[in-house]
């Protein structure tokens, strides 16, 4: 039976129902190890000195021998979740400080590389075949399979847990001077994928390659001979041999040399058959010399295509070929592939170019099964006004928050820097250039000694290891998803009707639960919360971001002092919202766009007052793990409340100043 054909643009990276998050055989990751505290490194002048602590070198896993910082916990939980999330996915990596964004991205990249190495080692320990690479002798094998075999996505391939991440950093500021910033995003993607696998395999795939097919049964056969290609090739070779034989007979055999017609027939047959082979070789050579990047640049620079509908379709064709090629390489390398696009410095560009990048992500690179992960590292308080100044907001009531929510499928808002992260940042700032170079050398030595895969959380002996916390997180995630699927549970009634919002909730719940368990490890806070309550909190933040942000901001302002904090701890969130609802109504004009993000107000009341009566104490604990709530909204609300208080106090201060003046 012939295998079923995989639709155009699909990738075999995500099999239905086989997510590692839901797989009982998942082996949770182990925390990375750093340099031993007793290890001494040579300092300036050759004197031994302890290995300095600070920001990790790029590509190296952050040290977790010492107690992990808050940023370490956030980045590790995100990296773990990205290994399970279905692609394509756009992660809104929200943080206010540009320098902090860079350091957090480096941590996420390091943890994902570590997870990749751990999964690779686990697959080998299970006795699975070693992955292949299209380099060295593997290049010849890849070219042979590209030419004569067709890949098949089998059930065994879908169950593979080993991953390879292809990290691509796109700094929008580097392309800010060009007219089409979105074209820079596409060309960077094509160039880096071509560079990763090599130019020759991709060139051969353009001419001879085929996209994978789904197996029709549970067969483990991953390669099927291309009978049509082989028959055509053998036919051309036979015709070519026959033409050459006729020509040689006409030229060499006595008595036949004088037959001019036989020479013409032999030459024509040999030329026609040989020309087909030459044309195929020339097509491969053309794709080898002219990369996808050059093709797209040529299209964008051409006035003939820029104003036509065929322009975007040609760009899309190049991306579709790239997606099919990645699906082919997944089967060849015996592992799943993920292309991680880290988009930075977007908030430094002009508004129209910012909107162009969002359009490129939405229309060109977001095929249904493309293995793309976009890490959009931006500051929402800067990006939202940029989007509202462009023409892309038509039909969205000029609401940049709504546009950003529709583009991002996994919001990840980094909260304020914690105490340990702040101390680590200060230590890194004090380090000299020589300290940083010695740290890179120490990291390289640790890699060669295999120190990256061992180690625990360090710190107190009562805290569970990362492995134990991850194992518990998997059980919590299963329980939370069960509550969402349970028709008898009142929580499912509050799920939004929009499929994009449901996906945001499903993507956010695993991160929230992992953060909750890691941050509350070894404390009584874990026993006070449940997976159902955490899932309900995620739904609350997604359905009513403005009202929840307002309630949390009022709770924060009211708990500045010790007495006020103790008084507020016993209140419910609904009572806090009721107390300050009139103030929110007075600010409905400056907060109108944020208020439009909220769902039905009556459902909000039923949610907090009846079905899920969260208290102020629970809200404070959950705030630190709330990644799907834009913290810039609360900052804006805090500023508006402060300005309102200044406005109420201003007439009093002027009266006090005017009294002595009038007395004169």
Image: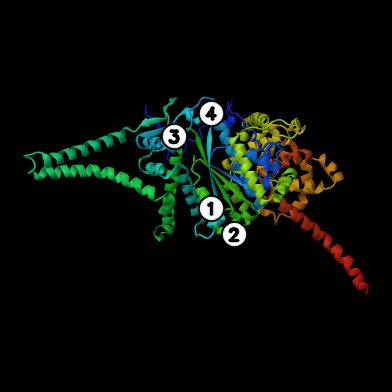
> Could you tell which of marks 3 and 2 lies nearer the N-terminus?
3
Q: Nearer the viewer, mark 1 or mark 2?
A: 1
Q: Which residue is mark 3?
A: 332
Q: CA distance from mark 1 to mark 2?
A: 15 Å
Which quarter of the picture shows residue 82?
A: top right
Q: Position of residue 504 (x, y in %)?
A: 60, 41
Given contact means CB atoms under 8 Å apart, are the residues at marks 3 and 2 in contact? no
Q: Quadrant of the C terminus?
A: bottom right
Q: Residue at x 41, y 59 (%)?
A: 302
Task: Give the mark toward the camera: 3 or 2.
Answer: 3
Q: Which residue is mark 1?
A: 357
Provide residue 321's location: percent of width, then percent of height.
42, 44
Identify the residue shown where x is 40% and y is 32%: 4
Disc sitting over residue 492 in the figure: none
Discs 4/1, front: 4
Above or below residue 185? Residue 465 is above
- Tell which of 406 and 263 is nearer to you: 263
Q: CA distance from mark 3 to mark 2?
A: 46 Å
């Amino acid at each position: 039976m012939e295998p079923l054909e995989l639709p155009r643009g699909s990738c075999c990276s995500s099999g239905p129902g086989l997510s590692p998050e839901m797989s009982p055989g998942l082996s949770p990751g182990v925390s990375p190890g750093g340099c031993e505290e007793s290890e001494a490194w040579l300092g300036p002048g050759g004197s031994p000195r302890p290995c300095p602590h600070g920001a990790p070198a790029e590509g190296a896993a952050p040290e977790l021998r010492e107690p992990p910082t808050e940023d370490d916990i956030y980045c590790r939980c995100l990296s773990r979740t990205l290994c399970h999330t279905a692609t394509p996915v756009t992660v809104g990596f929200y943080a206010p400080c540009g320098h902090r964004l860079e350091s957090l991205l480096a941590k996420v990249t390091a943890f994902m590389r570590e997870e990749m190495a751990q999964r690779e080692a686990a697959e080998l320990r299970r006795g699975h075949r070693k992955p292949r690479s299209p380099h060295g002798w593997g290049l010849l094998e890849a070219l042979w399979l590209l030419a004569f075999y067709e890949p098949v996505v089998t059930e065994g391939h879908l169950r593979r847990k080993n991953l390879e991440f292809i990290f691509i950093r796109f700094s929008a500021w580097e392309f800010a001077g060009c007219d089409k910033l979105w074209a820079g995003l596409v060309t960077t993607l094509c160039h880096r994928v071509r560079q990763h696998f090599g130019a020759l395999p991709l060139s051969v795939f353009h001419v001879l390659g085929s996209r994978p097919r789904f197996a029709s049964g549970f067969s483990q056969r991953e390669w099927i001979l291309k009978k049509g290609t082989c028959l055509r090739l053998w036919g051309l070779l036979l015709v070519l041999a026959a033409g050459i034989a006729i020509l040689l007979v006409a030229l060499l055999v006595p008595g036949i040399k004088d037959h001019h017609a036989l020479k013409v027939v032999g030459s024509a047959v040999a030329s026609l058959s040989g020309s087909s082979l030459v044309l195929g070789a020339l097509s491969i050579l053309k794709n080898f010399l002219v990369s996808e990047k050059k093709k797209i640049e040529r299209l964008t620079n051409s006035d003939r295509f820029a104003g036509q509908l065929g322009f975007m379709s040609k760009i899309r064709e190049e991306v579709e070929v790239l997606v099919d090629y990645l699906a082919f390489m997944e089967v060849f390398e015996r592992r799943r592939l993920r292309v991680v696009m880290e988009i930075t410095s977007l908030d430094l560009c002009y508004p129209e170019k910012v909107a162009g990048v969002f359009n490129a992500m939405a229309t060109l690179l977001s095929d249904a099964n493309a293995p793309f992960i976009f890490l959009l590292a931006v500051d929402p308080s800067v990006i939202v006004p940029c989007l509202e100044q462009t023409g892309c907001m038509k039909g969205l009531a000029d609401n940049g928050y709504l546009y950003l929510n529709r583009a991002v499928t996994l919001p990840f808002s980094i909260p304020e820097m914690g105490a340990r992260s702040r101390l680590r940042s200060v230590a890194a700032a004090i380090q000299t250039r020589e300290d940083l170079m010695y740290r890179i050398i120490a990291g390289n030595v640790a890699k060669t000694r295999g120190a990256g895969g061992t180690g625990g959380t360090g710190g107190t002996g009562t805290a569970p290891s990362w492995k134990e916390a991850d194992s518990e997180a998997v059980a919590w995630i299963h329980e939370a998803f069960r509550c969402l699927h349970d028709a008898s549970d009142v929580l499912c009634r509050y799920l939004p009707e929009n499929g994009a919002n449901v996906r945001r909730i499903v993507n956010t719940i695993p991160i929230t639960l992992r953060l909750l368990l890691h941050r509350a490890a070894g404390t009584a806070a874990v026993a006070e919360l449940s997976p159902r309550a955490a899932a309900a909190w995620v739904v609350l933040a997604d359905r009513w971001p403005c009202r929840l942000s307002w309630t949390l901001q009022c709770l924060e302002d009211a708990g500045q002092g010790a007495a006020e904090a103790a008084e507020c701890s016993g209140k419910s969130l609904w009572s806090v919202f009721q107390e300050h609802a009139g103030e929110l109504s007075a600010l409905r004009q400056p907060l109108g766009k944020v208020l439009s993000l909220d769902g039905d107000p009556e459902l909000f009341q039923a949610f907090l007052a009846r079905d899920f009566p969260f208290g102020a104490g629970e809200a404070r604990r959950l705030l630190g793990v709330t990644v799907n709530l834009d913290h810039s909204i609360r900052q804006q609300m805090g500023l508006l409340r402060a300005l309102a208080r200044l406005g109420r106090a201003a007439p009093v201060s002027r009266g006090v100043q005017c009294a002595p003046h009038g007395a004169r």
